[in-house]
Amino acid sequence: MIMQLVWFKRDLRVEDNLPLTLAAQDDAVIPLYILEPELWQQPDLSYRQYLFLQDSLKSLDEDLQKLGQRLIIRIGDAVNILEELTNQHNITSIWSHQETWNDWTYQRDKRVQKWLVNKGIVWNQLRQHGVIRKLANRDGWSLEWYKFMKQLPVNKPPKLKAVAIDTQVLPLAYELGLKNDGVTDIQIGGRKKALEILNSFLYQRGEGYTKEMSSPLTAYQSCSRLSPYIAFGTISIREIFHAVERRSLELKQLANSSRWQSAMRSFAGRLRWHCHFIQKLEDEPQIEFRNMHSAYDGLRENDFNHEYFECWKAGKTGYPMIDACMRALIHTGWINFRMRAMLVSFASYHLWLDWRYTAPYLASLFTDYEPGIHYSQFQMQSGTTGINTLRIYNPIKQGIDHDPEGVFIRQWIPELSAMPKEYIHQPWLCSALMNGYPLPVVDEKIARNNAAKKLYDLRKQSNHKGEAQQIVHKHASRKTRRVNTKKTIKKQELEQMELEL
Protein backbone atom coordinates (compact mmCIF):
# COMPACT_ATOMS: atom_id res chain seq x y z
CA MET A 1 0.00 0.00 0.00
CA ILE A 2 1.35 3.42 -1.00
CA MET A 3 1.67 5.78 1.94
CA GLN A 4 2.42 9.41 2.57
CA LEU A 5 4.22 10.45 5.73
CA VAL A 6 3.19 13.72 7.41
CA TRP A 7 5.83 14.96 9.85
CA PHE A 8 4.29 17.19 12.50
CA LYS A 9 6.65 19.73 14.02
CA ARG A 10 5.43 23.10 15.28
CA ASP A 11 2.03 22.66 13.59
CA LEU A 12 0.15 20.44 16.01
CA ARG A 13 -3.32 20.73 14.47
CA VAL A 14 -5.46 19.12 11.76
CA GLU A 15 -7.17 22.37 10.69
CA ASP A 16 -5.33 24.71 8.30
CA ASN A 17 -2.66 22.07 7.86
CA LEU A 18 -1.98 21.93 4.13
CA PRO A 19 0.63 19.13 4.27
CA LEU A 20 -1.88 16.85 6.01
CA THR A 21 -4.74 17.74 3.67
CA LEU A 22 -2.71 17.26 0.49
CA ALA A 23 -1.05 14.06 1.68
CA ALA A 24 -4.42 12.51 2.53
CA GLN A 25 -6.06 13.17 -0.86
CA ASP A 26 -5.32 9.78 -2.43
CA ASP A 27 -3.15 7.67 -0.16
CA ALA A 28 -2.96 6.42 3.40
CA VAL A 29 -1.13 8.75 5.75
CA ILE A 30 1.30 8.11 8.59
CA PRO A 31 0.87 11.16 10.86
CA LEU A 32 4.20 11.24 12.68
CA TYR A 33 5.63 13.20 15.58
CA ILE A 34 9.30 12.59 16.38
CA LEU A 35 10.27 13.23 19.98
CA GLU A 36 14.01 13.95 19.84
CA PRO A 37 15.69 13.58 23.27
CA GLU A 38 18.79 15.47 22.13
CA LEU A 39 16.67 18.49 21.21
CA TRP A 40 15.30 18.61 24.74
CA GLN A 41 18.82 18.71 26.14
CA GLN A 42 19.42 22.11 24.53
CA PRO A 43 19.68 25.05 26.98
CA ASP A 44 16.75 26.94 25.47
CA LEU A 45 14.25 24.10 26.06
CA SER A 46 12.66 23.27 29.39
CA TYR A 47 10.27 21.36 31.58
CA ARG A 48 7.44 23.89 31.18
CA GLN A 49 7.62 23.76 27.39
CA TYR A 50 7.53 19.97 27.50
CA LEU A 51 4.39 20.00 29.65
CA PHE A 52 2.73 22.23 27.06
CA LEU A 53 3.91 19.91 24.27
CA GLN A 54 2.41 16.88 26.03
CA ASP A 55 -0.99 18.59 26.23
CA SER A 56 -0.77 19.61 22.58
CA LEU A 57 0.17 16.14 21.32
CA LYS A 58 -2.65 14.57 23.29
CA SER A 59 -5.09 17.01 21.71
CA LEU A 60 -3.68 16.34 18.21
CA ASP A 61 -3.97 12.59 18.72
CA GLU A 62 -7.63 12.96 19.71
CA ASP A 63 -8.38 15.03 16.60
CA LEU A 64 -6.57 12.60 14.31
CA GLN A 65 -8.44 9.62 15.78
CA LYS A 66 -11.72 11.34 14.94
CA LEU A 67 -10.52 11.30 11.32
CA GLY A 68 -9.68 7.61 11.49
CA GLN A 69 -5.94 7.40 12.26
CA ARG A 70 -4.13 8.09 15.50
CA LEU A 71 -0.89 10.06 15.86
CA ILE A 72 2.23 7.94 15.58
CA ILE A 73 4.92 8.96 18.07
CA ARG A 74 8.48 7.79 17.70
CA ILE A 75 11.39 8.63 20.01
CA GLY A 76 14.94 9.09 18.80
CA ASP A 77 16.96 10.58 15.95
CA ALA A 78 14.89 11.88 13.02
CA VAL A 79 17.03 10.33 10.27
CA ASN A 80 17.06 6.93 11.98
CA ILE A 81 13.31 6.96 12.52
CA LEU A 82 12.54 8.08 8.97
CA GLU A 83 14.86 5.42 7.60
CA GLU A 84 13.15 2.73 9.66
CA LEU A 85 9.68 3.79 8.55
CA THR A 86 10.59 4.10 4.87
CA ASN A 87 12.19 0.65 4.95
CA GLN A 88 9.07 -0.89 6.49
CA HIS A 89 6.43 0.93 4.42
CA ASN A 90 5.97 2.06 0.84
CA ILE A 91 6.40 5.76 1.54
CA THR A 92 6.68 7.85 -1.61
CA SER A 93 6.72 11.35 -0.08
CA ILE A 94 7.25 13.13 3.19
CA TRP A 95 5.17 16.21 3.96
CA SER A 96 5.73 18.93 6.54
CA HIS A 97 5.51 22.64 7.07
CA GLN A 98 8.66 24.71 6.70
CA GLU A 99 10.16 25.26 10.13
CA THR A 100 12.14 28.24 11.37
CA TRP A 101 13.18 27.27 14.84
CA ASN A 102 16.43 26.98 16.77
CA ASP A 103 19.80 26.06 15.31
CA TRP A 104 19.57 22.45 16.48
CA THR A 105 16.45 21.84 14.38
CA TYR A 106 18.00 23.74 11.46
CA GLN A 107 21.03 21.42 11.46
CA ARG A 108 18.76 18.39 11.86
CA ASP A 109 16.69 19.41 8.84
CA LYS A 110 19.83 19.71 6.74
CA ARG A 111 20.77 16.15 7.72
CA VAL A 112 17.28 14.93 6.91
CA GLN A 113 17.30 16.68 3.53
CA LYS A 114 20.63 15.13 2.59
CA TRP A 115 19.44 11.68 3.59
CA LEU A 116 16.17 12.00 1.64
CA VAL A 117 17.98 13.13 -1.50
CA ASN A 118 20.20 10.05 -1.30
CA LYS A 119 17.14 7.92 -0.65
CA GLY A 120 15.24 9.41 -3.60
CA ILE A 121 12.26 10.45 -1.49
CA VAL A 122 10.59 13.81 -2.04
CA TRP A 123 10.24 16.11 0.97
CA ASN A 124 7.37 18.54 0.43
CA GLN A 125 7.94 21.45 2.81
CA LEU A 126 5.05 23.90 2.60
CA ARG A 127 4.73 27.43 3.90
CA GLN A 128 2.89 27.70 7.21
CA HIS A 129 2.52 31.46 7.77
CA GLY A 130 4.03 34.77 6.68
CA VAL A 131 7.67 33.63 6.70
CA ILE A 132 9.04 33.09 3.19
CA ARG A 133 11.92 30.70 2.57
CA LYS A 134 14.76 31.82 0.26
CA LEU A 135 13.48 35.37 0.24
CA ALA A 136 15.50 37.54 -2.15
CA ASN A 137 14.82 40.79 -0.27
CA ARG A 138 12.22 42.44 1.92
CA ASP A 139 10.62 44.48 -0.87
CA GLY A 140 6.93 43.64 -1.00
CA TRP A 141 7.11 41.31 2.01
CA SER A 142 4.12 42.90 3.79
CA LEU A 143 1.98 42.56 0.68
CA GLU A 144 2.88 38.89 0.42
CA TRP A 145 2.01 38.45 4.08
CA TYR A 146 -1.45 39.87 3.54
CA LYS A 147 -2.01 37.79 0.41
CA PHE A 148 -1.25 34.62 2.35
CA MET A 149 -3.38 35.57 5.34
CA LYS A 150 -6.34 36.57 3.17
CA GLN A 151 -6.52 33.02 1.80
CA LEU A 152 -9.08 30.93 3.61
CA PRO A 153 -7.70 28.42 6.13
CA VAL A 154 -7.34 24.94 4.68
CA ASN A 155 -10.02 22.45 5.69
CA LYS A 156 -8.98 19.30 7.48
CA PRO A 157 -9.23 16.02 5.54
CA PRO A 158 -12.71 14.45 5.71
CA LYS A 159 -11.13 11.21 6.87
CA LEU A 160 -7.86 9.31 7.04
CA LYS A 161 -7.27 5.72 6.03
CA ALA A 162 -6.36 3.61 9.05
CA VAL A 163 -2.78 2.33 9.10
CA ALA A 164 -1.63 -0.52 11.31
CA ILE A 165 1.57 0.87 12.80
CA ASP A 166 2.99 0.93 16.29
CA THR A 167 3.30 4.11 18.30
CA GLN A 168 5.38 4.89 21.37
CA VAL A 169 4.47 6.50 24.66
CA LEU A 170 5.91 9.92 25.35
CA PRO A 171 8.61 9.80 28.01
CA LEU A 172 8.05 11.60 31.27
CA ALA A 173 9.85 14.89 31.69
CA TYR A 174 12.39 13.51 34.14
CA GLU A 175 13.24 10.70 31.70
CA LEU A 176 14.46 13.41 29.32
CA GLY A 177 16.48 15.02 32.09
CA LEU A 178 13.98 17.88 32.47
CA LYS A 179 13.61 18.99 36.07
CA ASN A 180 10.75 21.00 37.50
CA ASP A 181 11.86 24.57 36.84
CA GLY A 182 9.58 26.34 39.31
CA VAL A 183 6.51 26.77 37.13
CA THR A 184 3.30 26.60 39.15
CA ASP A 185 0.66 28.18 36.90
CA ILE A 186 1.39 27.15 33.32
CA GLN A 187 -1.14 27.51 30.51
CA ILE A 188 -2.80 24.30 29.33
CA GLY A 189 -1.87 23.26 25.82
CA GLY A 190 -3.99 21.87 23.00
CA ARG A 191 -6.34 22.94 20.23
CA LYS A 192 -9.51 23.17 22.30
CA LYS A 193 -7.88 25.49 24.82
CA ALA A 194 -6.46 27.67 22.02
CA LEU A 195 -9.93 28.21 20.57
CA GLU A 196 -11.39 28.99 23.99
CA ILE A 197 -8.70 31.59 24.68
CA LEU A 198 -9.08 33.17 21.23
CA ASN A 199 -12.84 33.48 21.71
CA SER A 200 -12.53 34.93 25.20
CA PHE A 201 -10.01 37.51 23.98
CA LEU A 202 -12.10 38.59 21.00
CA TYR A 203 -15.41 38.81 22.88
CA GLN A 204 -14.64 39.29 26.57
CA ARG A 205 -11.09 40.16 27.65
CA GLY A 206 -9.61 42.16 24.80
CA GLU A 207 -11.40 45.52 24.90
CA GLY A 208 -8.59 47.26 26.79
CA TYR A 209 -5.76 45.55 24.90
CA THR A 210 -4.33 48.68 23.29
CA LYS A 211 -3.69 50.49 26.57
CA GLU A 212 -3.50 47.58 29.00
CA MET A 213 -0.90 45.43 27.24
CA SER A 214 2.05 47.26 28.81
CA SER A 215 1.40 46.77 32.52
CA PRO A 216 1.76 43.35 34.13
CA LEU A 217 -1.19 44.33 36.32
CA THR A 218 -3.53 44.20 33.34
CA ALA A 219 -1.61 42.30 30.64
CA TYR A 220 -2.30 38.82 32.02
CA GLN A 221 -5.99 39.45 31.41
CA SER A 222 -6.01 41.88 28.47
CA CYS A 223 -3.38 40.30 26.22
CA SER A 224 -4.60 37.47 24.04
CA ARG A 225 -2.41 34.83 25.74
CA LEU A 226 -2.33 32.96 22.42
CA SER A 227 1.44 33.04 22.03
CA PRO A 228 2.22 29.47 23.20
CA TYR A 229 -0.54 28.07 21.00
CA ILE A 230 0.90 29.92 18.03
CA ALA A 231 4.44 28.78 18.89
CA PHE A 232 3.40 25.11 19.07
CA GLY A 233 1.02 25.47 16.13
CA THR A 234 -2.17 24.24 17.77
CA ILE A 235 -3.81 27.19 16.02
CA SER A 236 -2.51 28.98 12.96
CA ILE A 237 -1.78 32.67 12.47
CA ARG A 238 -4.14 32.60 9.48
CA GLU A 239 -7.01 31.23 11.54
CA ILE A 240 -6.49 33.99 14.09
CA PHE A 241 -6.25 36.60 11.33
CA HIS A 242 -9.64 35.59 9.92
CA ALA A 243 -11.21 35.49 13.38
CA VAL A 244 -9.97 39.04 14.00
CA GLU A 245 -11.30 40.15 10.60
CA ARG A 246 -14.74 38.73 11.40
CA ARG A 247 -14.77 40.35 14.82
CA SER A 248 -13.72 43.71 13.36
CA LEU A 249 -16.63 43.63 10.91
CA GLU A 250 -19.04 42.85 13.73
CA LEU A 251 -17.71 45.74 15.80
CA LYS A 252 -18.26 48.24 13.01
CA GLN A 253 -21.97 47.54 13.30
CA LEU A 254 -22.03 48.19 17.04
CA ALA A 255 -22.36 51.50 18.86
CA ASN A 256 -19.73 52.54 21.42
CA SER A 257 -17.21 50.01 20.15
CA SER A 258 -14.25 52.33 19.55
CA ARG A 259 -12.09 50.72 22.25
CA TRP A 260 -12.79 47.27 20.85
CA GLN A 261 -12.02 48.41 17.31
CA SER A 262 -8.73 49.93 18.49
CA ALA A 263 -7.86 46.67 20.22
CA MET A 264 -8.48 44.65 17.06
CA ARG A 265 -6.33 46.99 14.96
CA SER A 266 -3.49 46.81 17.47
CA PHE A 267 -3.69 43.05 17.73
CA ALA A 268 -3.85 42.53 13.95
CA GLY A 269 -0.64 44.53 13.60
CA ARG A 270 1.10 42.22 16.06
CA LEU A 271 0.21 39.21 13.93
CA ARG A 272 2.22 40.70 11.07
CA TRP A 273 5.11 41.67 13.33
CA HIS A 274 5.22 38.10 14.64
CA CYS A 275 6.18 36.85 11.17
CA HIS A 276 8.32 39.91 10.45
CA PHE A 277 10.73 38.99 13.23
CA ILE A 278 10.80 35.27 12.48
CA GLN A 279 11.70 36.19 8.90
CA LYS A 280 14.95 37.70 10.22
CA LEU A 281 16.04 34.35 11.64
CA GLU A 282 14.95 32.54 8.48
CA ASP A 283 17.10 34.90 6.41
CA GLU A 284 20.08 34.85 8.79
CA PRO A 285 20.16 31.83 11.15
CA GLN A 286 23.39 33.03 12.77
CA ILE A 287 21.60 35.82 14.68
CA GLU A 288 20.96 33.13 17.29
CA PHE A 289 24.67 33.27 18.07
CA ARG A 290 26.29 36.26 16.40
CA ASN A 291 25.79 40.01 16.72
CA MET A 292 23.88 41.34 13.74
CA HIS A 293 26.38 44.21 13.49
CA SER A 294 30.03 43.20 13.80
CA ALA A 295 31.01 46.48 15.51
CA TYR A 296 29.58 45.02 18.72
CA ASP A 297 31.78 41.92 18.68
CA GLY A 298 33.86 41.90 21.83
CA LEU A 299 31.68 44.52 23.50
CA ARG A 300 30.58 42.49 26.53
CA GLU A 301 32.22 39.10 26.14
CA ASN A 302 35.18 39.79 28.44
CA ASP A 303 33.26 41.62 31.17
CA PHE A 304 30.71 38.97 32.13
CA ASN A 305 29.81 39.14 35.84
CA HIS A 306 28.50 35.75 36.99
CA GLU A 307 27.29 37.15 40.32
CA TYR A 308 25.11 39.68 38.50
CA PHE A 309 23.84 36.91 36.23
CA GLU A 310 22.75 34.74 39.16
CA CYS A 311 21.00 37.68 40.84
CA TRP A 312 19.14 38.48 37.63
CA LYS A 313 18.14 34.85 37.08
CA ALA A 314 16.75 34.51 40.61
CA GLY A 315 14.93 37.85 40.75
CA LYS A 316 17.27 39.26 43.39
CA THR A 317 18.82 42.32 41.77
CA GLY A 318 17.44 44.76 44.34
CA TYR A 319 15.23 46.48 41.76
CA PRO A 320 11.64 45.50 42.62
CA MET A 321 10.08 45.73 39.15
CA ILE A 322 12.88 43.63 37.63
CA ASP A 323 12.67 41.01 40.33
CA ALA A 324 8.87 40.84 40.42
CA CYS A 325 8.76 40.27 36.66
CA MET A 326 11.43 37.58 36.79
CA ARG A 327 9.73 35.76 39.64
CA ALA A 328 6.34 35.99 37.90
CA LEU A 329 7.88 34.60 34.73
CA ILE A 330 9.48 31.72 36.61
CA HIS A 331 6.15 30.73 38.15
CA THR A 332 3.82 31.32 35.17
CA GLY A 333 5.93 30.90 32.02
CA TRP A 334 4.70 34.24 30.68
CA ILE A 335 5.18 37.98 31.11
CA ASN A 336 4.06 40.76 28.78
CA PHE A 337 6.38 42.15 26.15
CA ARG A 338 7.28 45.51 27.71
CA MET A 339 8.41 43.70 30.84
CA ARG A 340 10.36 41.19 28.73
CA ALA A 341 12.10 44.09 27.04
CA MET A 342 12.85 45.64 30.43
CA LEU A 343 14.38 42.39 31.73
CA VAL A 344 16.63 42.13 28.68
CA SER A 345 17.55 45.81 28.73
CA PHE A 346 18.51 45.68 32.40
CA ALA A 347 20.64 42.57 31.91
CA SER A 348 22.37 43.93 28.80
CA TYR A 349 22.93 47.54 29.84
CA HIS A 350 22.84 47.92 33.62
CA LEU A 351 24.46 44.54 34.35
CA TRP A 352 26.48 44.54 31.11
CA LEU A 353 25.78 40.84 30.49
CA ASP A 354 26.40 39.31 27.07
CA TRP A 355 23.03 38.42 25.51
CA ARG A 356 24.36 35.03 24.41
CA TYR A 357 24.30 33.94 28.06
CA THR A 358 21.03 35.58 29.09
CA ALA A 359 19.04 34.66 25.96
CA PRO A 360 19.01 30.84 26.41
CA TYR A 361 18.03 31.19 30.07
CA LEU A 362 15.11 33.50 29.33
CA ALA A 363 14.10 31.28 26.40
CA SER A 364 13.78 28.34 28.77
CA LEU A 365 11.37 30.33 30.95
CA PHE A 366 9.04 31.27 28.11
CA THR A 367 6.39 28.64 27.45
CA ASP A 368 5.82 30.54 24.20
CA TYR A 369 9.50 30.53 23.18
CA GLU A 370 9.76 31.45 19.51
CA PRO A 371 13.44 31.71 18.44
CA GLY A 372 12.84 34.11 15.56
CA ILE A 373 11.19 36.65 17.81
CA HIS A 374 13.36 35.84 20.80
CA TYR A 375 16.81 36.38 19.29
CA SER A 376 15.78 39.29 17.09
CA GLN A 377 14.33 41.05 20.10
CA PHE A 378 17.26 40.16 22.34
CA GLN A 379 19.64 41.80 19.92
CA MET A 380 17.35 44.79 19.50
CA GLN A 381 17.01 45.31 23.27
CA SER A 382 20.76 44.73 23.76
CA GLY A 383 21.73 47.33 21.16
CA THR A 384 23.67 44.98 18.87
CA THR A 385 21.60 45.30 15.69
CA GLY A 386 23.25 48.63 14.85
CA ILE A 387 20.00 49.96 13.37
CA ASN A 388 17.50 50.29 16.22
CA THR A 389 17.14 53.12 18.71
CA LEU A 390 18.86 52.30 22.01
CA ARG A 391 16.19 51.53 24.60
CA ILE A 392 17.68 51.54 28.08
CA TYR A 393 14.72 51.03 30.38
CA ASN A 394 14.90 52.64 33.81
CA PRO A 395 13.43 49.92 36.07
CA ILE A 396 12.39 52.44 38.71
CA LYS A 397 10.43 54.50 36.19
CA GLN A 398 8.93 51.37 34.64
CA GLY A 399 7.68 50.34 38.07
CA ILE A 400 6.16 53.75 38.76
CA ASP A 401 4.53 53.86 35.32
CA HIS A 402 3.13 50.34 35.21
CA ASP A 403 2.68 49.38 38.88
CA PRO A 404 2.23 52.73 40.68
CA GLU A 405 0.73 51.27 43.85
CA GLY A 406 3.18 48.36 43.98
CA VAL A 407 0.43 45.74 43.74
CA PHE A 408 2.32 43.52 41.30
CA ILE A 409 5.58 43.95 43.20
CA ARG A 410 4.05 42.91 46.52
CA GLN A 411 2.37 39.91 44.87
CA TRP A 412 5.71 38.50 43.73
CA ILE A 413 8.09 39.90 46.33
CA PRO A 414 6.57 39.03 49.70
CA GLU A 415 9.62 40.47 51.45
CA LEU A 416 8.26 43.90 50.54
CA SER A 417 4.65 43.27 51.53
CA ALA A 418 4.83 45.83 54.35
CA MET A 419 6.73 48.44 52.35
CA PRO A 420 4.84 51.77 52.09
CA LYS A 421 3.76 52.86 48.62
CA GLU A 422 6.12 55.81 48.57
CA TYR A 423 9.13 53.49 48.96
CA ILE A 424 7.99 50.38 47.07
CA HIS A 425 10.00 51.23 43.94
CA GLN A 426 13.12 52.25 45.89
CA PRO A 427 12.93 50.13 49.07
CA TRP A 428 16.53 50.89 50.02
CA LEU A 429 15.25 54.29 51.14
CA CYS A 430 13.35 52.48 53.89
CA SER A 431 15.82 49.73 54.72
CA ALA A 432 14.17 48.85 58.04
CA LEU A 433 11.26 47.25 56.15
CA MET A 434 13.22 45.37 53.48
CA ASN A 435 12.96 42.02 55.34
CA GLY A 436 15.99 40.48 53.68
CA TYR A 437 15.30 41.87 50.22
CA PRO A 438 18.72 42.72 48.69
CA LEU A 439 20.17 46.14 48.05
CA PRO A 440 20.64 47.07 44.36
CA VAL A 441 23.49 45.21 42.69
CA VAL A 442 24.42 48.32 40.70
CA ASP A 443 23.72 52.03 40.79
CA GLU A 444 20.99 52.47 38.18
CA LYS A 445 21.97 55.89 36.87
CA ILE A 446 25.72 55.24 36.74
CA ALA A 447 25.26 51.86 35.05
CA ARG A 448 22.81 53.29 32.52
CA ASN A 449 25.07 56.22 31.62
CA ASN A 450 28.14 54.00 31.28
CA ALA A 451 26.31 51.62 28.95
CA ALA A 452 24.90 54.43 26.83
CA LYS A 453 28.33 56.02 26.39
CA LYS A 454 29.90 52.75 25.24
CA LEU A 455 27.14 52.10 22.72
CA TYR A 456 26.99 55.63 21.35
CA ASP A 457 30.79 55.75 21.03
CA LEU A 458 30.64 52.61 18.88
CA ARG A 459 27.95 54.11 16.69
CA LYS A 460 30.20 57.08 15.95
CA GLN A 461 32.86 54.89 14.37
CA SER A 462 33.42 55.52 10.68
CA ASN A 463 32.61 51.98 9.55
CA HIS A 464 29.40 51.66 11.56
CA LYS A 465 27.01 53.33 9.14
CA GLY A 466 27.91 51.27 6.08
CA GLU A 467 27.26 47.94 7.73
CA ALA A 468 24.11 49.30 9.37
CA GLN A 469 22.74 50.20 5.94
CA GLN A 470 23.32 46.63 4.77
CA ILE A 471 21.41 45.33 7.78
CA VAL A 472 18.52 47.70 7.06
CA HIS A 473 18.39 46.47 3.46
CA LYS A 474 18.28 42.85 4.56
CA HIS A 475 16.05 42.92 7.61
CA ALA A 476 14.14 46.18 8.06
CA SER A 477 10.46 46.64 7.38
CA ARG A 478 9.72 48.40 4.10
CA LYS A 479 6.74 50.24 5.52
CA THR A 480 7.23 53.98 4.96
CA ARG A 481 6.99 56.08 8.10
CA ARG A 482 7.30 59.75 8.86
CA VAL A 483 9.54 60.33 11.84
CA ASN A 484 9.06 64.03 12.50
CA THR A 485 5.95 63.96 14.66
CA LYS A 486 5.26 62.75 18.18
CA LYS A 487 2.30 60.79 16.85
CA THR A 488 4.44 58.79 14.44
CA ILE A 489 7.16 58.15 17.02
CA LYS A 490 4.53 56.75 19.37
CA LYS A 491 3.26 54.55 16.55
CA GLN A 492 6.78 53.22 15.97
CA GLU A 493 7.12 52.36 19.64
CA LEU A 494 3.79 50.55 19.69
CA GLU A 495 4.71 48.51 16.62
CA GLN A 496 7.68 47.05 18.50
CA MET A 497 5.80 46.20 21.67
CA GLU A 498 3.47 43.24 22.05
CA LEU A 499 5.12 40.71 19.76
CA GLU A 500 4.27 37.79 22.05
CA LEU A 501 0.57 38.54 21.42
Image: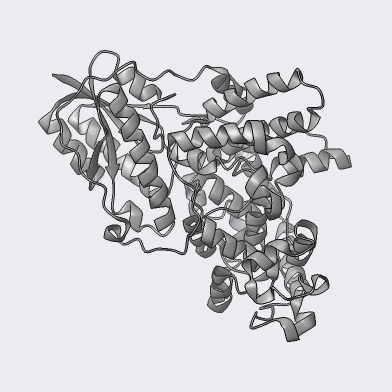
Residue at 39%, 20% in the rendered image: 156
Q: What is the quadrant of the C terminus in the image?
A: top right
Q: Quadrant of residue 355?
A: bottom right
Q: Position of residue 197 (x, y in %)?
A: 55, 37
Q: Is residue 250 left or right of residue 41?
A: right
The residue at 40%/63% (across/down) is: 180
Q: What quarter of the picture does the N terminus occupy? A: top left
- Residue at 26% in and 37% down: 114
Visible residue check, residue 349: no
In the picture as drawn, the residue positioned furthest to the right comes out as 485
Instruction: Looking at the picture, tell me which residue is in the foreground, 402 or 185.
Output: 185
* 98 sits left or right of 400 in the view: left
Q: Is residue 216 above or below residue 483?
A: below
In the image, taking residue 381 as reference, residue 448 lies left or right, namely: right
**Which quarter of the picture shows residue 265?**
top right
Could you tell me residue 368's position as x and y percent? 50, 47
For the question of whether residue 380 can be seen, the reply is yes
**Residue 331, position as x, y percentages in the image:** 52, 61
Q: Position of 106 compared to 297: left or right?
A: left
Q: Is residue 365 above or below residue 426?
A: above
Please, which residue is most extreme toward the top here? 26
